[in-house]
Amino acid sequence: MARLKEIVGPTYVLTRPEDVVVYEQDAFLVARALPDIVVLPGSTAEVAGVVRLVHEAGVPLVVRGAGTGLNGGSIPIAGGVMLVLTRMNRIVELDPRNRLAVVEPGAINVDVTAAAAQHGLFYAPDPGSQTVSTIGGNVGNNAGGPHCLSYGVTGNHVLAMEVVLASGDVTWVGSRSADHPGYDLCGVVVGSEGTLGVVTAIVVKLLRKSQAVRTLLAAFETIDDASQTVSEVIAAGIVPTAMEMMDGVVMAAVEAAIHAGYPQDAGAALLIEVEGHPESLPRQMKRIEEICRAHAPRMLRTAASEQERLLLWKGRKEGAGALGRLAPSYYLHDGVVPRAKLPDVMRKVVEVGKAYGLSIGNLFHAGDGNLHPIILFNPREPGIMDKVVRAGEEILRACVEAGGTITGEHGVGIEKREYMRWMFSDADLMAMQRVKRSFDPDGIMNPGKLLPVGERPDVTVRPAMAAGMWT
Amino acid sequence: MTQETGETMLQSRDRATAGPRDRVVLNLPELDQCVHCGLCLNHCPTYRVTHLEPESPRGRIHLVRAVAEGRIEALDPARGTPNERFAEHIYLCLMCRACETACPSGVQFGRIAEAAREVLGPPGSPMARRLARLAFTQVFPFPRRLRWLASALRLYQRSGLQRVIRLMLPRRLREMEALLPTVPSRFFAPEADLPAIGKRRARVALLSGCVMSTLFGEVNNATVRVLRRNGCDVVVPRGQVCCGALNVHNGETTAARRMARRNIDVFLDAGVDAVIVNAAGCGAAMKEYGHLLRDDPDYAERAARFAALVKDAGEFLAGLGLVPPSGRIEMTVTYQDPCHLAHGQKVRAQPRQLLAAIPGLHLVEMEGADRCCGSAGIYNITHPEMSKELLTEKMAAVGRTGAEAVVAPNPGCMLQLRFGAQRYGPALPVFHLMDLLDRAYEAKTDC
């Protein structure tokens, strides 16, 4: 403990219950577990020093950013040391000519875009949490966002990373230039959820802003009409930069919260955005509108001003949070289906809600088939959590059966580690396990996450450290 | 240290309905509404400075939840004194409520923090706590004692004693002493009858306020003149007392409820269309009397009726339709959103509309206009370090606008920004919105 305090300074080593209890949970509401020690380093050297100590002591190490993760990935289920990187939030370098930025892991997503905006550039991945979530966390979970439909997810925008390995050694993966030879270790580390190493610097790509953008809100009678429209737009060979769906439940909550002008009595609405050359947009929009009209839309509205466009998006970004107005709590799910199967799976989601007697809101990236059913519930109702988890499980199974996956952008964490078996054979999982072992031979990096451990994650976890071993 | 490292998954959140009082009191329904999304973090001034979860709204809510679940003690079970570390987190909060604006789920964080402070009692050392209780229960509820105290302070400042004492104080106390505002020569002493000028449009009552009437008497006079010019009969009911906001924010609610009941009686008797408040903190507190007295069978209904009458001066005039001032003020100003106006009362557009109505006046927005300046009631005295950090950031933002003056319709912000202008620069004047409107009307009569 004294050595930890020497490395990062006494203010940034937390052990009292009144300090560490707030780090027991992230945005995954189903589980929590107390860390023994929380450390907030301020530099790569400090991170390396802490990791070396933790490695020597052989205790678990969990990395956390802003704590907005939805899969429980930053919950220290085995106790140990938690490394919180919120102090390492600088944008170290901004290189507009090469269109890249070097940032620390605690840098906030929207701050990177704001800094780049001065040069007419932006950072593309835009998760719903972008005003608070960190680039480090985005990298760990390979975060997506509405505009990933045409821009791709976080992994497509990371060029290189500085990584502190489990031994405490510091290394770089990837490179600033394209076409890096050898193994794509960047690809391995992105989405590894802190199970391989600690990322302490990230080189990200910046993109030039499009010259023009059009945003259309299309409301329909039923979720089915909206789903069909999505399938047909994609089938027609159009790739909007974003195509988001929200159902009637969500729209009502959003209207109550921010008055974005969504119709309140429609079954579902699509928010469709196209970007590009000013001359090419009207033609694209016309084609999209035609497809919408075939499904008897209740409303077709193109944002007339940038202000109106931002308001439409604000409603989308804060939609999940606004559901807090309908029920005290909710469980936000994440699954992917092939876009042609969207109407079928959406029907299944509605069925599951009925079967379990649960209200489910839908707010998701329809364009890439990335569903986000949001199950509303009251945590004070006895036995409710079990029911909610089972309903969610059934929805995810339907996604996998339709040829999709168990997560689009939230990651696996503890939430979905056992569902990995639905997608991968024992041999596949063993191969992944070997990758982990080659980075982290002693298994101290974020244990119990990402890969199945063979039991439902509803275990009471024992403290990892003996009392007093750090004092 | 490792007494409780794990928790069972799939827990149900059963919380105390019986047990120690702090657990029961803090078992608030508001806690369930927080879904831990974290969208508040970046809007919280103390989180932005510290980057520590316990100093964030979500962290504080989680701490209160841990108390309600009996996993942390708010009070020492044997002695009944506050758990110091818990109290530090709860009291480092500025109560600016920027998190409420940011929260998509509509969590009313202010209510959670106020409840926690009610359990803890006033902040600081045992000595400071006693002093605070004395002030909250024996001074603020009594306008005459308050004026007497302000007179004493004025004497201290005028007699030359201040200069002598300053030399003798240790650094920490000297810095606190430097925050003392200069007491003007006259307190607010309105005439009985303040009739509307021109066509009568409304009959309103004005809250004189404790700080406003002693330190900002001129702003109160300006407010009265502006209201009259807008066709309002103004009454300033005798018998009114301080609104009790400082009490509520600092964990003293017994006297606060007494003061609220008194004000409700006095103002409802006045038979007015609106109760006008020109201090944002007071306005927010008075609009929440309904919540403060929700368990009082005799007053719950009256409190709600009273609260509906309360209007911020700027909010009221914008709603009424401002009589356009024709006098010009050639000046570039920037506007500081008082937290309890922007976040507490959701009043943002109206003051800006009124500024735009003044001919010649040019408004330049500053970066983070709705971010707290660090005044926060008595926060600049209880937490000088954090307050200073926020003030320096604020003054830098003001400086970048190139404005010649700052407008902030709240006494706490005005005092803090004046202190900032003097200590860190830019050296510019700080006005109340009513000051400028009054000047614009007066300029007309001059020509």
Image (spheres, coloured by chain):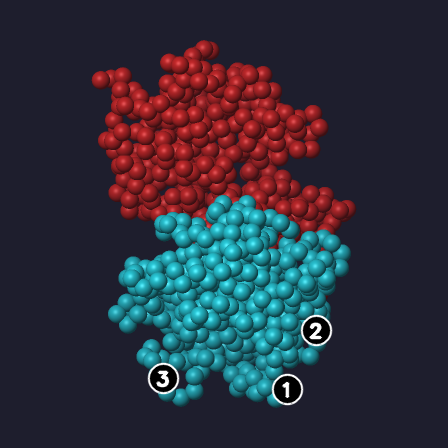
Q: Nearer the viewer, residue A404 or B225?
A: A404
Residue B388: which quarter of the image?
A: top left
Residue ID at (36%, 45%): B394
Amino acid bearing label 3 = His
> The chain coloured red carries which letter?
B
Q: Which of marks 3 and 2 is nearer the N terminus?
A: 3
Classify 10 Å Cα crowding around label 1: few (below 14), some (14-19), many (20 and above): few
Q: Nearer the viewer, residue A198 or B33?
A: B33
**Residue A68, percent across and down?**
53, 61
**Frontmost residue, B388 versus B443:** B443
Q: Do labels 3 and 2 share a chain?
A: yes
Chain assignment, label 3: A
| Corner quadrant of residue B406 | top left
Element at label 3: loop
Residue A214 on image: x %, y %: 37, 57
Which residue is depicted at the point 76% across and 56% down? A382
Please name the color used to draw chain A: cyan
Residue A313 location in percent, x, y? 45, 55
Observer able to see residue A105: no
Answer whether residue A229 is visible to the viewer in this image: yes
Which of the numbered marks, if any, corresponds to residue A180?
3
What amino acid type should be assigned to the residue bearing mark 1? Answer: Asp
Whichever of callouts 1 and 3 sits on the residue coming sooner in the sequence is: 3
Q: In this view, does B298 lie to the left or right of B203?
A: right
Chain name for mark 2 = A
Quadrant including the N terminus of chain A: bottom right
